[in-house]
């Protein structure tokens, strides 16, 4: 009860969204299955040759993670928009960027974190070494929150529009490219016997940038979309 | 003189018409000079033969494509910050021209790649960045087209353009990194050692010509946007009535 | 004190209203009337700061509501067209979340009590999905019981879907807020017996 007001508000929104996700567990499974299926399609498409698959693995897993987190974005604000709770969030006496941050955090915990946990398993199927698997999980841990934060801007901009899903991908995927390059790059560097340090630093820097700017941009976008 | 006099759409409309004509004329003259230099004055390149002459189109369009994105984001930001309708209309008018320039740069890059590398497309850092820039333009245009309310369209587009312009350097940097890491092909048209001064001049004049064309095209488009949005206003109706009377008098 | 000056509302091509103005002092009730599509909801959303007027200004104690930001939102209780309750949460959970966000002193016990006052005793711990329209509206209205300190209530159709008893309850809550010096603005289609010594009616559309 004694937590400072902004923190209490952040925790309140975070808890609410986690509780809602818990009561709608099937939604979470969808994203996860999508991720697994997309990754499994690649060996079927290019053939089971082990060397080729090992080279492709970082890119494949990362592209699948990109698509999965983009797919999940549609649910970030849509529910709150439909039942009017979004208006109440906007009218709450707190900085809207903070509340958006809480929503993105909850969203990441239920859609992003499972990808991080699952990715090494999928990497095994592509014959990645133990070190590469660890780095793959680490890059996803650093990269997927950035995807959620940047994606929130797109989700806020396309709120309530016809064909929002396809439009969202057009807006958001180009912005995901740096995360893809450095995420997959780090794993590839390890696979080639190099250190992933530089890549990971850049991923961290991108995350820091996104944490500071994306919630506010998404908040501005939400206000515009609610008018 | 009041600087903001021309910030009102109905006063800007006739001014934009005059300016567009001037810029188009300049574009034709400069284009003629630039092409003359490009085709007749500039020497044949020692390594690349005659094929290199496509840089007189490729480089200026690539420059314009990036420049226009920044200008578009600038007008969008002004529109968002000061709630000026004309700035938002300018941003909307620039986008198709910017996308067109990006497309031309990609196309001429591909045309140049075929004789030089034997393939239409190489995943070179510049070409890839240019491709992503095209996606950014298309995203901006698609978002604005998907929103019916012009006010929301302006403001949502502005947020996207600003987010985009912040991301463009990051994207460019990461694509560069990606490219050097993979030692991909590099289509460096401008870093040729034998770059003659005349080539540089030709390129600069062509860049100016394209700049003038872009200004003309944008102003023409912004006139159409103004008319469309103000079609209920008295001045736009008077204009339409005048045009109709003119047609009838001619018939 | 809430002052609106020269408000204009454009939705797409249509001008819903223009040059609209009023002044509301503490304890005053503003009843906004008008046909469907006359801009009642738009006006209310403007007064909350959700929708920017195309012309005109809205002042709260002399300052523009846009510049006041959070300070204004802390003074405001808004009930929208939609109930803003989560179907998957119970009525108590909904109330706890919304009132924590509004910085009201809310506990599980006080939330249950508020719901009981609005006739939802026995339904507090059910997911609101299973409640009827009227019960959902009551669950949303229970928020008002925690917002006495909010000096401005903006209520969009608060009485819709309510039965006679609930209408009387809500009218009583509104009358109490007015008596305590609050400003209340609402829209309604029905005749509602709110006791308000200082009542203003505003008719939109022609």
Image (cartoon, rainbow, N blue to C red):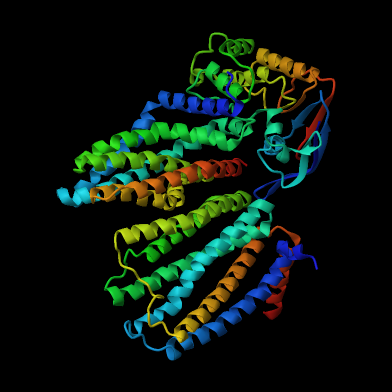
Please name the residue shown 56% across and 19% down the image.
C96
Q: Residue furthest bottom?
A: B40
Above or below, C121 relative to B231: above
Image coordinates of residue A152 in percent, x first then y, are: 49, 42
Where does the N terminus of chain C fall, quadrant-wise? top right
Of residue B106 and residue C122, the one placed in the foreground of this image is B106
User: Is any part of residue C154 visible from this angle?
Assistant: no
Q: Quadrant of residue B191?
A: bottom left
Image coordinates of residue B186 in percent, x first then y, are: 33, 68
Image coordinates of residue B123 in percent, x first then y, are: 33, 63
Please name the residue shown 20% across and 47% down the image.
A43
Above or below, C35 relative to B55: above
Of residue B119 and residue A158, the one placed in the foreground of this image is B119
User: Is any part of residue C59 visible from this angle?
Assistant: yes
Q: Quadrant of residue B43?
A: bottom left
Please name the residue shown 54% across and 29% down the image.
A10
Image coordinates of residue C76 in percent, x first then y, are: 70, 28
Where does the C terminus of chain C fall, quadrant-wise? top right
Please tell me how many numbered marks the rendered image carries.
Answer: 0
Above or below, A47 relative to A114: below
């Amino acid at each position: 009860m004694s937590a400072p007001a902004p923190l209490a508000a952040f925790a309140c929104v975070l808890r609410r969204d986690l509780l809602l996700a818990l009561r709608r567990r099937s939604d979470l499974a969808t994203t996860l299955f999508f991720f697994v299926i997309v990754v499994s399609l690649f060996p079927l498409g290019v053939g089971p040759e082990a060397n080729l698959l090992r080279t492709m693995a970082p890119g494949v897993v990362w592209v699948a993670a990109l698509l999965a987190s983009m797919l999940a974005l549609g649910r970030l604000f849509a529910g709150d928009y439909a039942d009017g709770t979004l208006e109440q969030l906007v009218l709450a006496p707190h900085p809207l960027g903070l509340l958006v941050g809480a929503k993105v955090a909850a969203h990441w915990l239920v859609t992003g974190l499972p990808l991080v946990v699952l990715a090494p398993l999928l990497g095994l199927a592509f014959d990645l070494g133990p070190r590469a698997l660890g780095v793959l999980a680490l890059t996803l841990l650093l990269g997927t929150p950035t995807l959620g934060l940047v994606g929130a801007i797109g989700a806020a901009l396309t709120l309530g529009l016809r064909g929002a899903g396809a439009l969202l991908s057009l807006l958001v995927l180009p912005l995901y490219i740096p995360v893809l390059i450095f995420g997959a790059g780090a794993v590839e560097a390890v696979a080639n016997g190099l250190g992933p340090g530089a890549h990971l630093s850049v991923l961290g820097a991108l995350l820091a940038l996104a944490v500071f700017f994306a919630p506010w941009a998404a908040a501005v976008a939400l206000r515009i979309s609610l008018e | 003189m009041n600087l903001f006099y021309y910030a009102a759409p109905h006063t800007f409309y006739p001014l934009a018409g005059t300016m567009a004509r001037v810029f188009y004329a300049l574009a034709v003259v400069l284009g003629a000079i630039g092409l003359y230099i490009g085709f007749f004055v500039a020497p044949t390149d020692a390594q690349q033969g005659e094929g290199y002459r496509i840089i007189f189109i490729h480089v200026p369009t690539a420059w314009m494509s990036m420049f226009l994105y920044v200008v578009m984001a600038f007008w969008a930001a002004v529109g968002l910050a000061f709630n000026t309708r004309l700035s938002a209309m300018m941003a909307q008018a620039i986008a198709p021209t910017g996308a067109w320039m990006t497309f031309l740069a990609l196309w001429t890059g591909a045309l140049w790649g075929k004789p030089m590398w034997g393939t239409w497309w190489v995943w070179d850092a510049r070409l890839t960045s240019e491709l992503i820039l095209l996606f950014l333009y298309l995203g901006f245009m698609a978002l604005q087209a998907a929103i019916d309310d012009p006010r929301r369209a302006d403001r949502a587009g502005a947020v996207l353009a600003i987010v985009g312009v912040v991301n463009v350097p990051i994207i460019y940097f990461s694509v560069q990194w990606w490219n050097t890491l993979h030692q991909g092909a590099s289509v460096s048209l401008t870093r040729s050692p034998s770059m003659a001064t005349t080539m540089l001049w030709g390129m600069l004049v062509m860049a100016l010509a394209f700049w003038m064309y872009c200004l003309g095209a944008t102003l023409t488009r912004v006139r159409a946007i103004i008319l469309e949005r103000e079609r209920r206003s008295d001045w736009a109706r008077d204009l339409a009535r005048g045009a109709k009377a003119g047609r009838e008098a001619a018939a | 004190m809430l002052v609106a000056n020269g408000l204009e509302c454009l939705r797409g091509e249509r001008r819903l209203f223009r040059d609209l103005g009023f002044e509301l002092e503490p304890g005053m009730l503003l009843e906004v009337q008008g046909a469907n599509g006359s801009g009642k909801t738009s006006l209310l959303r403007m007064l909350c700061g959700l929708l920017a007027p195309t012309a005109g200004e809205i002042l709260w104690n002399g300052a523009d509501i846009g510049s006041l930001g959070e300070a204004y939102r802390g003074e405001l209780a808004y009930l929208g067209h939609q109930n803003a309750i989560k179907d998957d949460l119970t009525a108590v959970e909904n109330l706890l979340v919304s009132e924590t966000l509004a910085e009201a002193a809310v506990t599980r016990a006080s939330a249950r009590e508020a719901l009981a006052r609005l006739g939802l005793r026995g339904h507090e711990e059910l997911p609101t999905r299973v409640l009827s329209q009227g019960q959902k509206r009551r669950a949303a209205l229970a928020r008002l019981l925690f917002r006495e300190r909010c000096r401005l209530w903006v209520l969009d159709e608060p009485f819709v879907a309510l039965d006679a008893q609930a209408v009387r309850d809500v009218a009583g809550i509104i009358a109490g807020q007015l008596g305590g010096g609050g400003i209340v603005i609402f829209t309604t289609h029905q005749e509602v017996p709110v006791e308000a010594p200082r009542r203003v009616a505003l008719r939109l559309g022609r």
